[in-house]
Amino acid sequence: MIPLPPRWMLFTGALAALALAIPPVVIARVRATPDPERAVHIFFDMDFQPKFKPQGQNPLFADGRAQRYDVAGTVAKGETKLDAHLFEGVVDGKWAEALPAGLAMSDEFLARGQQRYNIYCSVCHGYAGFGDGAVNKRAMELMSNSEGPVNGTSWVQAKSLHDPLVREHSLGMLYNVVTNGIRNMAGYGAQIDLEDRWAIAAYVKALQLSQNASLQDVPPELRDNLKKGEVK
């Protein structure tokens, strides 16, 4: 039988093991805990690299500014946007009347526009486009209370898409409005994909036509049936 070591050795060994375990625990705790002061860095990574902070100074340049303007004539990769029709809705300096090359008007395209419109636009403009969306209704109710604007804010009645002035907007202008906004309306260029913005513009034109159509807008093969009341 192997004799056990003296108790004082076991006790000393346990204390040594505990002491060796403390530094890793403390280091892990310090690295995982946010600290307003400079934290302990075992690995410097890029925390201490030479750099200029925003709005800082740099004596290298004559104006002393660290932040520099974009070099004239340079364009970020993938952002040339040379096709004014596609990206701006403009053709020869005028608002485009048709879809850009590569996009085709179809039932599927209009259905996509309707889906995107219902998500992003109907909350203010309403599903039928009369400016009676749920958000707009609630905002107008709050604005009409006896105490006036809520928390100092204000709200402008959402535009009806069937307003005579809005009905005159061409397809390209509607796309531009969706992209960049107009007056109090913010643009959705950052939230909605480019093709979907064109689809929304096309759907708005269809929505306007649905409320302001004439007999001449009906396909010839359906006009006689429409006159007889057979088309629903």
Image (cartoon, rainbow, N blue to C red):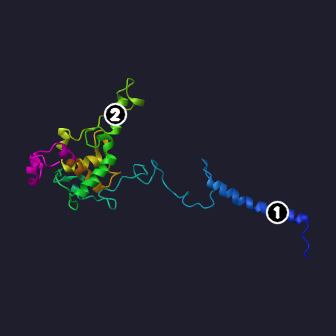
Left or right, 212 with reference to 70: left
* Quarter of the image where the N terminus is located: bottom right
Which residue range is magenta in the image?
A: 207-232
Q: Specify the amino acid type for callout 1.
A: Ala
Closest to the observer: 87 or 170? 170
Q: Quadrant of residue 127?
A: top left
Which comes before the other along the chain, label 2 or label 1? 1
Residue at 37% over, 26% down: 145
> Farthest residue in the bottom direction?
1
In the image, what residue type sits under mark 2? Trp
Query: Viewer-proximal residue, 161 or 190?
Result: 161
Position above or below: 134 against 118: above
User: Which of the labelled discs sits on residue 14, or is there none?
Assistant: 1
Q: Dividing the picture into quarters, in which one does residue 155 lie?
A: top left
Residue 155's disc is 2
Q: Nearer the viewer, mark 2 or mark 1?
A: 2
Is 212 colored magenta in this rendering?
Answer: yes
Percent of width and height locating residue 149: 38, 28
Give 7 or 143, whichever is nearer the viewer. 143
Residue 31 placement (x, y as % from top left) = 63, 56
